[in-house]
Image (tube, grey):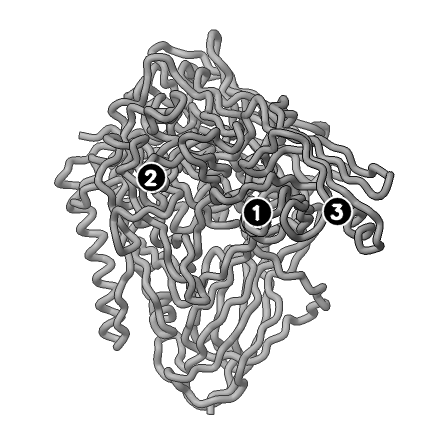
Amino acid sequence: MRVQPRSALVLTVVALAIGGAAAVATRPGAKPRTPVAPVSWLGLVGAPRAAVSTAGRAIVVLKTPPVAERVQQQHGYATEIQERTWSASAGAAQKQVLLRLAAAGIAVKPDYEYTRVLDGFSAELDSRAVSLLEQMPEVAGVYPVRVAYPASISEKVLASKEYAAGSGHRPDVQLPGTTGKGVTIALLDTGVDAAHPYLRGRVLPPIDLVGGDPSADDGHGTELAGILVGAGGPGGLHGVAPGATVLPIRVAGRQQDSSGEDLVYGRTDQLIAGLDRAVDPNGDGDAHDAVRIALVGLAEPFGAFTDGPAAQAVQGALDLNTAVVAAAGNDGAAGPSFGSVAGPAGAPAALAVGATDARATVPQVRVVLRRGLDVFYDRTLPLAGAAAPSHPLTLQVGDGVGKAAVLPVGGDPGQTVVAASRAGAAAVVLYGSPLPAGGLRLSDDATAPAVVVPAAAADELLAARRAGIDVEVAVGPARRSANAGRGGVAGFSSRGLAYDSGVKPNLAAPGVAIATAEPGRAEDGSALYGTVNGTSAAAATVAGAAALLAQLRPALAGPALESLLAGYARPTGAPVTAVGAGALDLGASAVGELASDPMSIGFGVWGGAHWHATRELTIRNVSTRRLEVDTSVAVYGDSEALRFLVAPARVAIPPGKARKVKVSVLAPAAPAGTRLVTGAIRIGAPGTETLRVPWALLFRQPAADLLGSVSLSETSFAPSDASPAILTVRAGAVVRDGGTQIVPVRRLDILLYSTSGKFLGVMARLNDLLPGAYSFGITGRGPTSARLKPGSYELRLAAWPTLPLAAKPDRAQATFRIE
């Protein structure tokens, strides 16, 4: 029996074919829009991601309860037979939907089917399929498939070398007497090199959900596995939980991008399939063999939706006692409203992790730029790569052997350094966005030391050279220096809010220059090691910590395990939206006696003088003694306009039991000049550490039109399934208002009317849309898939914001004619 208590940016462009018809549309009273420059995922080092087409791919979620929901309905108790029966029932519901489509002449072959964490499937859907699915009462929603990328970059070095010129290190995360023994961590990533000596004996047979070689590894998975369970590395290097076991579930790998080139990525439907197997590794429909922890090393850029299929799958996994640790993303600061948090980290049930730089020292060099006799730049800078000068270098600027190459950071600075080294450069001076020490992915022939200077300094140097003035670059020998940014949030680390205004990430952990394994072998046959940077490395650090905590306290349920790690994090002074409750403090988590559900709270958007909001917390006593628990609210920053009420403020909770507490906020007036107020709900008892639940309240959202241009390739046409007209809708927005901010769409409806105003049905209803262009195939069929009669029709479009939920939608209208 189970006891399961519950207590700059990538804008994904999705093209989804839908039946129906429309013409050029205008939004009544719409004001001219200021064009927004194209924005793509800048990633850790500023490189845009290659485009990947997911056109036509969708995830269909059904209303039939999956295994996870059934277990919760029975208060956590279920037999093996019951769970297999429920899994079969969820699968049967999918077959009924597919049969109904087939009866209408539409053959749909699912790519993935889900029965444990949610009930649904993913597939390529044609125009009529989507329209019919929207009419079926058993369908809860149709969602776009999006792309997820490994949330880190790495630098490979040989075992005989120091990691990234000495900058690599292992996270200082440990619990005396624990190694994670007996705990299995599912690693949803690119696969693992199980033959690597650093991992040998601690990796289970892989599960491949991408296709191809199930033991294939594209690098990232091996790196995260090393952080988790590595042992016996050079210099005593080991992972956070070397006694734990990794179950590789390959949900990403080399797949074709839009240009036909290979790119390492995964899709959200593949990721959900990974969670569905993590809770049922042997695939028999019974989830009693669910892993204790699932680590998601991929990030769906800016996909911080809280109610979509990925978020539902994370909640389903947690309901089956699997804690889900996810990388917050590597897109840096955004907001101050909606931030840059990736999916599935934005899911309320996900333990989202941001990255800090925990190194005590970093390799640095002194860099001097001279113009004639004028020294106009003299700074000590971190080395961006592994090559470190052992003696002073004084170099002329230019191309060729023995000179200093001065080049822009560009989209792939690592390749820039490699190319310059191969051309004989003695040093590479990059200019533009700064990089962390050891932050470049380089091959072994990148022999030139690399640094990054401000663009203004490089401009002066190059301008003087063009004018014929003598210029030089001096680079001093490498020295270990105190890391001025130690403990600070890494610049690349994504931060909140999620799209329900909840605080993300939940906590932060070391994620810069983490030493680990690299797949493959060197030319001499020795194992490869290197360093990795990114929030996936930070998430692996936390997942390893979770394994240690699970070994120490095996009775902890999944939600309590997540809450202890997040709620007892150490405050750092960094904004709540960057670190949640703070930095990982495993010692405090190990002795924590209280857990909360949820781990963070969003109060939504302030609605005026009479507005108020109430949120409910479930507080669980995970100790062995009765606790008298006090709950209070702390406000960070301007608190004059806020009033809080906690009911009850004090409650007695017996061991193993839970109590509910309601927290209400009132704000008669908005604080002057304040868009966002944050704080923490403090939960404590005599003799205990204080558990903190971060919260956020928005006072203003950026103004933006959710429906932009709407256009149709033809305005009058005959019905055609083979050659439909194409309706293109720009939904959502990216605005610059106190920072770059994403304005997504919670739901887009396309409704069909006659020109006399008679409602004819729903043509399409799409959920959770990131800003972008969405294309619909217009076949001339109506909501029931029957061909429309000749005549004029009207489409009415409505786009709802994610907050507030009661807000009115933006609307547009379109007319068309069927010949």
Q: Residue at x 51, y 87 (%)?
A: 817
Residue type highlighted by circle 3: Ala
Depicted 92 relative to depicted 346: above or below: below
Whether residue 75 appears in this view of the structure is no
Q: Which residue is mark 2?
A: 187
Q: Is residue 770 left or right of residue 319?
A: right
Q: Which residue is mark 1?
A: 421
Compare residues 208 and 749 and report the one nearer the observer.
208
Q: Residue furthest left?
A: 81
Marks 3 and 1, how far apart at CA: 19 Å
Compare residues 519 and 757 and report the one nearer the observer.
519
Secondary structure beneath dot 3 equals helix
Q: Position of residue 659 (x, y in %)?
A: 40, 23
Hey, which quadrant is residue 188 in on the image? top left
Discs 3, 2 touching: Cβ within 8 Å:
no
Discs 3, 1 touching: Cβ within 8 Å:
no
- The numbered mark, 2 or 1, whose residue comes first in the sequence reads 2
Secondary structure beneath dot 1 equals helix
Compare residues 339 and 534 and report the one nearer the observer.
534
Q: Which residue is mark 3?
A: 458
Depicted 314 relative to depicted 744: above or below: above
Depicted 722 relative to depicted 86: above or below: below
Marks 3 and 2, how far apart at CA: 43 Å
Residue type highlighted by circle 2: Leu
Q: Position of residue 582 (x, y in %)?
A: 54, 26
Q: Residue furthest top?
A: 687
Marks 2 and 1, how far apart at CA: 36 Å
Secondary structure beneath dot 2 equals strand
Q: Residue furthest right?
A: 373
- The numbered mark, 3 or 2, whose residue comes first in the sequence reads 2
